Image (tube, rainbow, N blue to C red):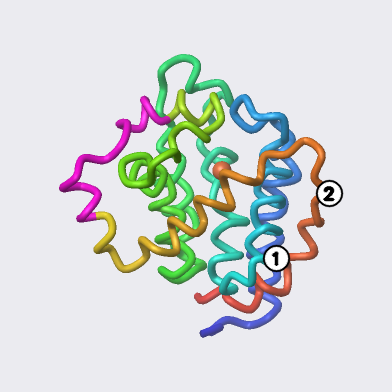
Amino acid sequence: MNSIEPRKADEVIDGIFHLYRARGDQAYLGEPVSMTDHMLQSAALAEAAGAAPAVVAATLLHDLGHLVHGLADDAADHGIDTAHEEVAARWLAPWFGPEVVEPIRLHVAAKRYLCATEPGYLARLSPASVLSLSLQGGPLTDADSAAFAALPHAAAAVELRRYDDEGKSAAAVTPTLEHFRAGLVAIVTS
Ligand code: FE
């Protein structure tokens, strides 16, 4: 539930949007879209699919770690896993509940899970996503896949992941950040 003043919630969202505007123009890890456009596109897909508000928010915020970790956007080309999912989860945890934070924390594990369990998934990944997969540990083992699937927010993480995978089109028309403000304000928690 929303337990902070609306003005404070707006300030939190302002801070997040500032990051997107200040640092989100960088290329999205070898994809044909910027970081900000990638997250806006993915969130628009979530919204169009009728996803829960927390999943729309998580999708909009899922790669925020790339904006705050301070490493170059071609880190993967240099063999560096930026652990951007953990960076984002820690950064957002003071402001959003686990239904937003945990799918973000798990969205890389969700990719590894889908590579292990869904025939054809890996073959559909973009080249940049295949490169980062190896740095992220590759497909999960059977035991780790079962453990992942048992986590409380695994299904939401897989849902987020599918929007993430689709939100990389150079041609897509994306909504603005402000389009998502009211939805975020409504679920800022503390
Ligand atoms: Fe992404």
Q: Is residue 75 above or below residue 99?
A: above
**Regarding mark 2 in the picture, which secondary structure is present there?**
loop
* Residue 135 painted magenta: yes
Q: Quadrant of ligand 1?
A: top right
184 or 53, nearer to the observer: 53
Q: Which mark is residue 32?
A: none
Q: Quadrant of residue 136?
A: top left
Q: Is residue 123 above or below residue 147?
A: above
Identity of the residue furthest to the top in this view? 78
Q: Residue at x 70, y 46 (%)?
A: 20
Q: Earlier in the sequence, mark 2 or mark 1?
A: 1
In the displayed structure, does residue 42 sit left or right of residue 106?
Answer: right
What amino acid type should be assigned to the residue bearing mark 2? Val
What residue sits right under mark 2 in the picture? 173
Q: Residue at x 73, y 41 (%)?
A: 22
Identify the magenta region: 133-147
Q: Kindly report the secondary structure that dominates the magenta region of the rendered protein.
A: helix
Identity of the residue furthest to the front in this view? 119
In the displayed structure, does residue 6 sit left or right of residue 142?
Answer: right
Q: Which mark is residue 48?
A: 1
**Regarding mark 1 in the picture, which secondary structure is present there?**
helix
Q: Residue at x 53, y 51 (%)?
A: 162
Indicate if the residue with disc 1 has its beta carbon within 8 Å of ligand 1: no
Q: Quadrant of residue 12?
A: bottom right
